[in-house]
Image (tube, grey):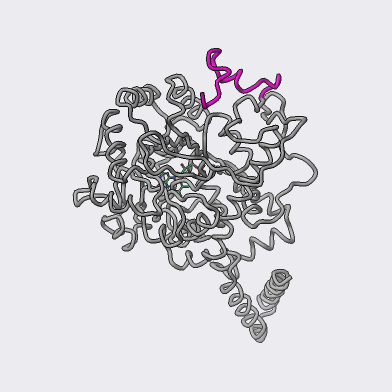
């Protein structure tokens, strides 16, 4: 109601401005200025809408279109989302779940169910009861001394630097409330990751931010100090990420503030390019030794690595080295080439690395084929933002899923594509203090919590519709695809592995 009142107030203001413009009657300013001030003051102080908080008057154009001319708004959105990673419908779903409002859809599907390409779940005539408890997965192999019972759905790596401090804090508080983890990203573990008390997966990238010596090399002492903090539940070595595999992390100069430079131990206001490869190891043997070293230094916390698949023979060689050394990572995170980033060179974003689906199938099959699948958890990331995409990833071989951009949407991201130039209008991916204030931590942490909860609940509902009671019973055969509605296993699995699920 109040929103409507102010929208009509704003309309009135526009009319008054138009009259003034065409008649030149200066006394109309007596009306214009107070209206403008009241609207501005109200919007700057409200806590729900980041855009209106940051742009108290101009931000109305977005809501005006939404209210009085949805078709026009739709036209512009479709044009503006054309070619962007996520469609309007995908984002709306996240917004609704984050706001904890009804996310059902009217009238039927808006997808074109072309039978040649259609893919769907084979529901059961005898559905199971929907589990009200959200699924969890134990991570930790034989050498792990502090296994972690993780949520099946968590926040993917995003650094403080790439995200604002308010975004990091809101995610952490949401994670604490919902019992899931926040991955720090390669920018280091900061106070903002710790103050909310949420579980943390600490990511170690090639820049070793937070655990580097004066020369930028890995420092065992500094690592050990932070790795043993109680909030740190798992440690992830970043080999590569889908949006820029083979390229190191990029922190644009505009986002490298004094504060971030201090945390990372670099020169402020310069572009920070992390090296493409690690200096602590340069081959498969070295990687396995590094896993062993981190495990010792962290007193047996789960250690894993993240990569986007490129040269498949290299991944196979790593697996053979694990077997030879009898040392396994507790988890492997597979990121698809469609993955997101704060900043990446276009050539790397568009043309390097394997997409999520074939990469996941390859990794799952390789571990099964070598008989080591039961020793390692697979975490999948690549546009996973709904219950359906979670179930799909589990069916293709993942044990757990991460989402980065899904959680950004839950914080209010509108996909403005300004993460790289410090001008994010919603305060999610910027270091500009003025813009950051639009993101109110208490409000957005609730949205993070609800997005996680409602999305996993939707996954539980789909699981029950497929007649299953546990995610560990899900395999590729619950999906069908193509004009003959073939089992996905027919399409993907060679005969000898056809009936093998991921846990053999
Ligand atoms: C703003 C932003 C920052 C990111 N920073 C990192 C990072 O520091 N380390 C990393 O491994 N991946 C990083 N990623 C990649 C994500 O963790 C994730 O792997 C990828 O975006 C795929 O997930 P999504 O499709 O749910 O976004 C970042 C992604 C985004 C959008």
Q: Nearer the viewer, residue 10 or 204?
A: 204
Is 135 on the left or on the right of 168, as rendered? right
**Residue 394: in magenta span:** no
Residue that extends furthest to the top in the rendered view of this protein: 495
Q: Nearer the viewer, residue 366 or 131?
A: 131
Q: Position of residue 150 (x, y in %)?
A: 49, 44
Q: Position of residue 135 (x, y in %)?
A: 58, 43
Query: What residue range appears in magenta?
Result: 481-504
Q: Residue at x 73, y 55 (%)?
A: 70
**Residue 482: in magenta span:** yes
Ligand 1 quadrant in view: top left
Q: Is residue 156 above or below residue 119?
A: below
Q: Position of residue 419 (x, y in %)?
A: 46, 53
Q: Is residue 122 above or below residue 9?
A: above
Is 263 on the left or on the right of 170, as rendered? left
Q: Residue at x 56, y 13 (%)?
A: 495
Q: Is residue 208 above or below residue 434?
A: above
Q: Is residue 166 above or below residue 347?
A: below
**Can residue 341 be seen at all in this image of the molecule?**
yes
Is 437 on the left or on the right of 232, as rendered? right
Q: Nearer the viewer, residue 302 or 486?
A: 302
Residue that extends furthest to the right in the rendered view of this protein: 107
Q: Residue at x 72, y 74 (%)?
A: 12
**Can residue 424 be seen at all in this image of the molecule?**
no
Quarter in which the N terminus is drawn: bottom right
Q: Position of residue 258 (x, y in %)?
A: 31, 63
Residue that extends furthest to the left in the rendered view of this protein: 215
């Amino acid at each position: 109601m109040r929103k409507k009142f102010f929208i009509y107030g704003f309309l009135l203001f526009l009319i008054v401005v138009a009259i003034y413009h065409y008649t030149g009657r200066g006394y109309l300013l007596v009306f214009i200025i107070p209206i403008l001030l009241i609207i501005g003051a109200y919007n700057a102080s409200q806590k729900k809408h980041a855009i209106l908080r940051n742009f108290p008057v101009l931000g109305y154009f977005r809501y005006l279109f939404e209210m009085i001319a949805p078709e026009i708004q739709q036209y512009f959105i479709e044009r503006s989302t054309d070619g962007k990673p996520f469609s309007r419908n995908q984002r709306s779903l996240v917004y609704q779940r984050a706001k904890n409002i009804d996310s059902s859809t009217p009238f039927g599907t808006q997808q074109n169910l072309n039978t040649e390409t259609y893919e769907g779940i084979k529901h059961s005539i005898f559905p199971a009861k929907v589990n009200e408890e959200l699924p969890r997965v134990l991570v930790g192999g034989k050498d792990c001394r502090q296994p972690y019972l993780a949520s099946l759905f968590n926040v993917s790596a995003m650094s403080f630097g790439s995200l604002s401090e308010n975004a990091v804090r809101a995610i952490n508080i949401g994670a604490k409330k919902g019992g899931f983890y926040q991955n720090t990203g390669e920018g280091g573990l900061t106070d903002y990751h710790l103050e909310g008390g949420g579980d943390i997966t600490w990511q170690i990238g090639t820049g070793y931010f937070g655990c580097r010596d004066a020369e930028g090399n890995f420092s065992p002492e500094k690592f050990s100090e932070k790795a043993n903090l109680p909030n740190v539940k798992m440690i992830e070595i970043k080999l590569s990420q889908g949006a820029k595999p083979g390229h190191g992390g990029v922190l644009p100069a505009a986002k490298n503030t004094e504060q971030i430079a201090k945390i990372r131990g670099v020169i402020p206001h310069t572009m920070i390019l992390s090296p493409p490869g690690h200096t602590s190891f340069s081959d498969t043997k070295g990687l396995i030794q590094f896993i062993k070293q981190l495990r010792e230094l962290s007193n047996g916390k789960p250690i894993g690595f993240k990569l986007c698949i490129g040269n498949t023979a290299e991944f196979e060689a790593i697996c053979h080295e694990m077997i030879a050394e009898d040392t396994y990572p507790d988890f492997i995170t597979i990121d698809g080439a469609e993955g997101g980033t704060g900043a990446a060179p276009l050539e790397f974003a568009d043309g390097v690395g394997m997409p999520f689906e074939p990469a996941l199938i390859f990794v799952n099959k390789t571990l099964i084929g070598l008989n080591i699948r039961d020793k390692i958890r697979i975490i999948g990331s690549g546009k996973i933002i709904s219950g359906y995409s979670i179930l799909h990833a589990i069916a293709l071989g993942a044990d757990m899923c991460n989402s980065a951009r899904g959680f950004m949407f839950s914080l209010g991201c509108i996909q403005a594509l300004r993460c790289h130039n410090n001008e994010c209008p919603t305060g999610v991916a910027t270091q500009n203090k003025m813009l950051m204030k639009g993101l109110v931590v208490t409000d957005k942490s609730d949205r993070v919590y609800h997005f996680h909860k409602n999305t996993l609940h939707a996954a539980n509902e789909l699981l029950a519709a497929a007649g299953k009671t546990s995610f560990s019973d899900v395999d590729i055969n619950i999906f069908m695809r193509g004009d003959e509605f073939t089992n996905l296993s027919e399409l993907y699995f060679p005969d000898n592995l056809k009936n093998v699920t991921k846990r053999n």
